Amino acid sequence: MLISIASQVFAIFVMLGILTAIIIVHECGHFSVARFFGFQTPVFGFGLPFGPSWTIGTRWGTEFRVHACLLGGYVAIPELGDESNQEEAFGVPLKPFRKFPIWQRALVAFAGVGFNIIFAYIVMFGMYASLGEPTQPTVIYSLIKSNPIATDAGIKINDQLVAINEHKVKSPDEAVHLLVAHKLEPVKIEILRNGQPITFNVTTNKDGRVGMGLVSKGPVSYQKMEGNIFEIAWAALVRLWTLTYSMVEALGQMVSGIFSGGGGGAADPGHKFGLQDLHGVLAVIKIGADIAQQDWSQLFIFTIMISMDLAIINLLPWPALDGGHLAFMAVEAVRGRPMGEKSQGELVKWGFISLIVLMAVVMVNDITALVTGKLDMKKKKEERQERPAPDETPAPTTPGN
């Protein structure tokens, strides 16, 4: 019992460390590019800027602080518009502001996202070079009645998807990517049924789908990569692109479902997406800790997904996010002059307020999910393997096709 508790606590601390490292990488991106162009960076903080803090040194005109709440980090860049006070930032006096061209400010705003993408790729490449390429059986979890292409061809629930057009399928998101690349085209689908290989020839619909709900099922294995370092690097890049494509598509389906009040799109047509489906830090820590306890090697992919998720979210054109800065700069470039200080200030203010409200909703969702066991990955996995798959609802954790 004590060993189990100690293992769980250790796994939680591992996830906290990973999450903090990813955020620090993001802030290092902003900091590095800002320093390169000569922006002021009065404070670089490790942790959240609440409660007591300790200054550990000053260099390059930057005061480095460690906060009591060691989760994440931040960097103040006043000339990017992060601070409304023109005289000081986080208690540090500022020099007179310089006017920087749009392209330099845009690079500083994008740098955090860029560093997250680079970090995700480095982790992916490290995984491919050391462990190999991760593979897990991709199983047909359900057949979607509204799109009977796969059903009419003879594909059945619990068939294992092996290859599409002779390209070996290593994950559900890769299968989705392969099918979407062949809209309204004939494709050859190879499956295993009770250990016997079967091939089906089908034609996808206009969305590149055939009516299959897909899920990863079974143990993850790693296949050592063959080829030189450049081939491994390219394979890692392709996998990162495929994974990111699926994440963006899933985010689009969720946003569409929330605002339309309708179904969950291709991934889960039987589920009604809503604000209750949004989760945050607590959910990430819980799921990551479960993964760390079950199979530490899967933390590679989980870390990559968190880093890319942070990059994708920050690129949204919402005030108070990096994408918001880029949107303001785009308006400035089109108009030939910046948006009025008052108007921009109001947008940023309401952007912050909306993010705080969203964070409160996400926190409630996380706590509710923790209490009800919705985030218990082991329990969900066992339930999915034991119960018969319904006809219309694919596994909600993966894209459908």
Image (spheres, rainbow, N blue to C red):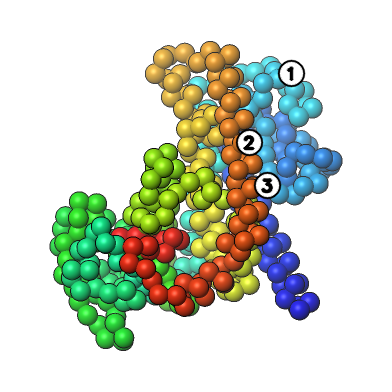
Location of residue 336 in the rendering, given as x and y in whole percent from the top left corner? 42, 14
* Element type at mark 2: helix
Q: Residues within 10 Å of mark 2 (few under 14, many from 20)?
A: few
For the point 63% across and 36% down, the residue is 356
Residue pointed to by mark 2: 356
Measure the C-alpha gap from mark 1 to mark 3. 26 Å
Q: Which mark is residue 87?
A: 1
First in sequence: mark 2 vs mark 1: 1
Quadrant where the N terminus lies? Answer: bottom right
Query: Can residue 128 be seen by looking at this rendering?
Result: yes
Q: Quadrant of residue 176?
A: bottom left
First in sequence: mark 1 vs mark 3: 3
Is 283 rendered above or below residue 159?
A: above
Q: Nearer the viewer, mark 2 or mark 3?
A: 2
Q: Nearer the viewer, mark 2 or mark 1?
A: 2
Apparent side of residue 377 relative to residue 63 in the rendered image (left or right) = left
For the point 18% across and 68% down, the residue is 152
